[in-house]
Image: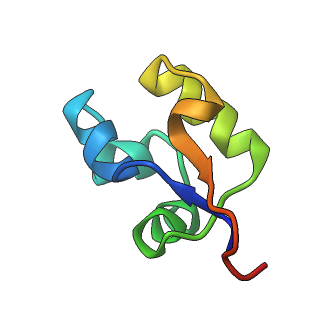
Amino acid sequence: MPMKYKFNILAALKEKGYTSNKLRNEKILSESTMQKFRTGEIVSTENITRLCRLLDCQPGDILEYVPGEKD
């Protein structure tokens, strides 16, 4: 996949006070979305937007393009 996360998303959320339980219980992120973060799968733009709001950052701070990687 030519796109990847620049850092551990769940660890960054935890630093901001968002535990897995809080994310699930308050319906901030679904379990399937959190599993995608664990496995490095790219999530929807809606979820990237939500991450930007939670982490106070831009999409480019979260994702990077890796040339030459398999589509």
Q: Position of residue 34 (x, y in %)?
A: 47, 61
The number of discs equals 0
Residue sitting at the far bottom: 70
Q: Kindly indicate the quadrant of the structure image that contains residue 4.
A: bottom right
Position of residue 58 in the picture relative to residue 13 (left or right): right
- Seen in the picture, residue 40 relative to 64 is either above or below; the reply is below
Tell me what residue is drawn at x 57 percent, y 61 percent. 33
Q: Is residue 64 left or right of residue 20?
A: right
Q: Residue extending furthest front?
A: 68
Residue 12 shows in the view: yes
- Tell me which corner region of the image, top left, top right, bottom left or bottom right, holds residue 71: bottom right
Q: Quadrant of the N terminus?
A: bottom right
Residue drawn at 61 percent across, 33 percent down: 60
Q: Position of residue 47 (x, y in %)?
A: 66, 44
Residue in the foreground of this view, choosing between 57 and 31: 57
Left or right: 44 in relation to 23: right
Residue 10 x %, y %: 34, 51
Relative vertical location of residue 61 with respect to residue 35 in this rendering, above or below: above
Q: Which residue is painted at 51% across and 21% down in the image? A: 57
Tell me residue 65's x, y (percent). Answer: 66, 54
Question: Viewer-proximal residue, 61 or 13?
Answer: 61
Relative vertical location of residue 54 with respect to residue 68 in this rendering, above or below = above
- Residue at point 37%, 49% (across, down): 7
Colouring scheme, one of rainbow, by chain, secondary structure, one colour: rainbow
Q: Is residue 28 visible?
A: no
